[in-house]
């Protein structure tokens, strides 16, 4: 079973998806980490401003993989775990810009879909339910008020030792929102059959419980349909 969780930055989708996967006993795929890893590779190779044709050829040589380990897909670049290097605003903004390009999206599509073929999966991102897994059995779209999302991001940066002004965080978030929602390829939007959940004012445990109950309900429906065909 594939469960997709999409939404804008600061909506709580990453934390909720990770805990949801643990609650259900599913594997977890953070697709944003894949885009950030590409951004890191581009930064290291001086390819951050390359054209699409040049990027297309370069991407074939990037040693990127998503390897399942202890219930999560670990993102490796040249065999190295990239997590310590991709959670900063420079990589975040570069990943957002590169994610609008067809070669990047096309290159990562195969990695993402391969994860879905490996077993039960919770996939978190921005186009999981609309493009990558359009036939996913359960789809969610998380959102929250703009100010709430900015505050969450501001607290997250402070916890990572990357303090920033709240106004700057809000401006960056608005820029990412515009870029993600207005791009021609896979714009950020809920899938037609997704459950939309506004997480403003909801704690993480409550959000995870809502999602888990919905997935279990969907599992029950699918089980009933399977029994009817026997």
Image: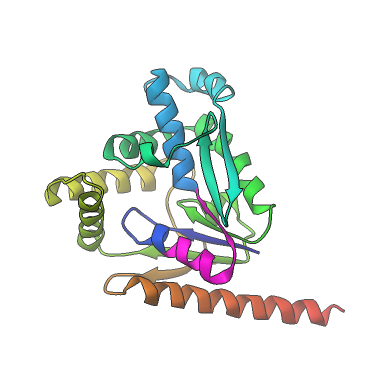
Q: Is residue 181 above or below residue 16?
A: above
Q: Is residue 38 above or below residue 70?
A: above
Residue 31 locus on image (x, y percent):
49, 47
Residue 156 locus on image (x, y percent):
26, 54
Disc count in the image? Answer: 0
Residue 20 locus on image (x, y percent):
49, 67
Q: Is residue 24 magenta?
A: yes
Q: Is residue 142 above or below residue 217?
A: above
Residue 100 locus on image (x, y percent):
43, 36
Stretch in magenta: 16-30
Does residue 47 appear to the left or right of 10 in the view shown? right
User: Quarter of the image containing the C terminus?
Assistant: bottom right
Residue lying furthest right in this view? Answer: 230
Q: Quadrant of residue 175?
A: top left
Of residues 97 and 46, the one nearer the viewer is 46
Does residue 168 appear to the left or right of 14 in the view shown? left
Q: Looking at the magenta stretch, what is its main secondary structure?
A: helix
Q: Is residue 193 magenta?
A: no
Can residue 47 be seen by looking at this rendering?
Answer: no
Of residues 171 and 161, the one nearer the viewer is 161
Residue at the (19%, 48%) spot, across then down: 169
Does residue 206 appear to the left or right of 77 in the view shown? left
Residue at the (56%, 38%) spot, across then down: 108
Can residue 201 be seen by looking at this rendering?
Answer: yes
Residue at the (61%, 76%) spot, across then down: 218
Colouring mode (rainbow / by chain / secondary structure / one colour) = rainbow
Q: Is residue 42 above or below residue 157?
A: above
């Amino acid at each position: 079973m594939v469960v997709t969780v999409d939404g804008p930055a600061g909506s709580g989708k990453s934390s909720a998806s990770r805990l949801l996967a643990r609650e259900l006993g599913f594997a977890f795929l953070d697709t944003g980490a894949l885009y950030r890893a590409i951004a890191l590779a581009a930064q290291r190779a001086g390819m951050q401003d390359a054209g699409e044709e040049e990027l297309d050829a370069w991407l074939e040589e990037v040693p990127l993989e998503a390897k399942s380990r202890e219930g999560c897909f670990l993102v490796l670049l040249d065999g190295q775990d990239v997590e310590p290097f991709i959670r900063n605003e420079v990589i975040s903004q570069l990943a957002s810009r590169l994610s609008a390009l067809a070669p990047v999206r096309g290159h990562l599509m195969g990695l993402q879909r391969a994860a879905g073929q490996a077993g039960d999966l919770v996939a978190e991102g921005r186009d999981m339910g609309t493009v990558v897994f359009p036939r996913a059995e359960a789809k969610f779209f998380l959102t929250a008020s703009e100010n709430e999302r900015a505050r969450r991001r501001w607290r997250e940066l402070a916890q990572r030792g990357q303090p920033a002004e709240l106004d700057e965080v809000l401006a960056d978030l608005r820029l990412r929102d515009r870029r993600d929602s207005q791009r021609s390829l896979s714009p950020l939007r809920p899938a037609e059959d997704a459950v939309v959940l506004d997480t403003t004012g909801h704690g993480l445990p409550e959000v995870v419980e809502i999602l888990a109950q919905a997935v279990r309900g969907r599992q029950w429906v699918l089980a009933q349909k399977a029994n009817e065909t026997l």
